[in-house]
DNA sequence: TTTAACTAATCAATCGTTTGATTAATTTTG
DNA sequence: CAAAATTAATCAAACGATTGATTAGTTAAA
């Protein structure tokens, strides 16, 4: 009886593991070649499963894409939202915490964010880009509210351009993560290497981002 | 005789006009759907020419892509290079001129830059991404040299992170230009609209970028 | 007449998806 | 408990559609 239950659980686990494995591979292949450039044959081949399993599990190629999406997005957003809603800390600390969490997540899950941004950069709208836009806007709004609150409270320089500051923080991140061949040559190390990411990239990126925002957002007559 | 010459010139003109027209359409379609997402039938259809003409003129689909590339890249790079090599102005003025030229060009030719960055964001290397990387790196190097010179001369803060500053300037630009659905919602106007670009976006973007760089690059004991 | 410009038709290859069959696992029945 | 019935997972093969490219033939220009 006990054995029966354990075996059942084991099977369930292996099933979700398999699904997760497919999504891992698909995420990487989509990042490497783009949605249209990646074929279902290639994904299933590299994942070591029969091609029909993609449709069996996820319905379609787009279903695979959306499944990757749903897997990553939920936990990510709750973390950021909780920081935005934390009223026990001041604007500068909020900014710090937001940057720490955001940079950690984004650099680690770089395949996902490459994939995501490639699709959203299609200038022709469709159902998929609309969905992605809505989700991204949630993250943007959290950051924007932190800045807006800080300005209202007098912590940040009131002349700051909130909207373009959004472009700078997310744009700088995108540049590093989404164009790895370029940023690797600029920075002098491989930004796709996991060790490099943790030891060199993340701390340096965080420090830089905070210094930059401090220089721009600081009130002119404040002392350091 | 005169008529003959004029007609001949007219024909030549019409031919290059036709080629240029195809490249205009292809550039837009590539930006809308990506290289893999855009079919040769769609491009030729929207351009109003027979599909075989693409191969007749440009050899292949990739030939069309490269032709778009060559058309845009040459004039652009010489302008930026001339600014970088101009020794009659100081570092701050150089930065200003570079930003003015760069932002003008990039915002106006947004389709091209969307297309370009979509392809370079494929994390798997190939011949095409290598070519694009080399070309982009030329622009990056010009900017990097301006910063490095300014630091060496003592005009800019020596503690500035040159490499990540590159990520910020090009990243901020990319964010606005390459993800128009997002940046339009953030900014509150349509960044793809030509009038909006000239009247609102360009001047505001230039002003912001200069203020941001000034805040970050300024030596701490300098007065404004 | 010779060359260049252009077209309709067609090519093999690949695309995402579906199929019918087979095996393994689970539940129901006698 | 064991046999039968049912469900889930997996596979090779094939589907129609679309892809980029080429062909052979036509029109127009020099």
Image: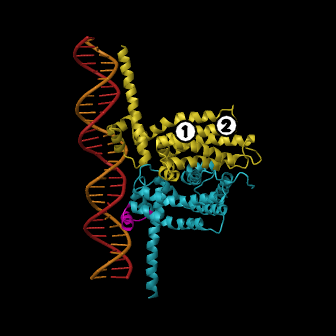
Chain colours: A yellow, B cyan, C orange, D red
Q: Is residue A173 left or right of residue A215?
A: left
| Residue displayed at 61% across by 49% down | A168
| Residue displayed at 53% across by 43% down | A200
Secondary structure of the residue carrying numbered label 1: helix
Disc 1 crowd, CA 10 A, few/some/many (<14, 14-19, 20+) = some
Q: Is residue A74 visible?
A: yes
Q: Is residue B48 magenta?
A: yes
Q: Identify the mark nearer the N-term, 2 or 1.
A: 2
In magenta, the rendered stretch is B47-60
Q: Which mark is residue A104?
A: 1
Q: Position of residue B84 (x, y in %)?
A: 58, 65
Give me the chain letter of mark 2: A
Q: Is residue C9 left or right of residue B102?
A: left
Q: Is residue A35 visible?
A: no
Name the quarter where the N terminus of chain A is drawn: top left
Q: Is residue A168 magenta?
A: no
Viewer-closest of B96 and A189? A189
Tell me: residue A163, above or below residue B18.
above
Q: Position of residue A26 (x, y in %)?
A: 41, 41
Viewer-closest of A171 and B50? A171
Q: Position of residue A30 (x, y in %)?
A: 42, 45
Give me the chain letter of mark 1: A
Q: Is residue B81 left or right of residue A30?
A: right
From mark 2 to mark 1, how far is it between C-alphas? 17 Å
Tell me: residue B135, above or below residue B7.
above
User: Which residue in the structure is indicated by mark 2?
Assistant: A93
Viewer-closest of D28 and A193? A193
Same-chain status of marks 2 and 1? yes
Name the quarter where the C terminus of chain A is drawn: top right
| Residue displayed at 53% across by 45% down | A130
Secondary structure of the residue carrying numbered label 2: helix
Disc 2 crowd, CA 10 A, few/some/many (<14, 14-19, 20+) = few
């Amino acid at each position: 009886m006990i054995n029966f239950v354990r075996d059942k659980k084991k099977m369930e686990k292996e099933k979700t593991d398999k699904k997760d494995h497919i999504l891992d591979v698909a995420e990487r292949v989509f990042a490497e070649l783009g949605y249209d450039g990646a074929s279902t044959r290639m994904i299933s081949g590299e994942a070591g499963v029969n091609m029909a399993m993609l449709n069996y599990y996820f319905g379609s190629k787009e279903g695979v894409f959306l499944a990757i999406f749903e897997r990553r997005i939920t936990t990510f957003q709750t973390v950021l939202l909780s920081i935005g809603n934390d009223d026990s800390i001041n604007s500068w600390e909020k900014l710090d915490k937001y940057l720490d969490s955001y940079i950690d997540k984004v650099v680690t899950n770089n395949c996902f964010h490459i994939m995501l941004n490639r699709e959203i950069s299609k200038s022709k709208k469709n159902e998929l880009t609309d969905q992605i836009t809505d989700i991204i806007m949630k993250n943007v709004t959290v950051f924007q509210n932190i800045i807006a609150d800080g300005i209202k409270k007098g912590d940040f320089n009131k002349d700051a351009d909130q909207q373009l500051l959004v472009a700078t923080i997310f744009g700088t991140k995108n540049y590093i993560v989404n164009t790895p061949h370029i940023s690797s040559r600029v920075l002098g190390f491989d930004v796709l290497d996991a060790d490099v990411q943790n030891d060199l990239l993340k701390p340096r990126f965080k420090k830089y981002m905070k210094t930059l925002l401090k220089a721009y957002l600081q009130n002119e007559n404040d002392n350091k």
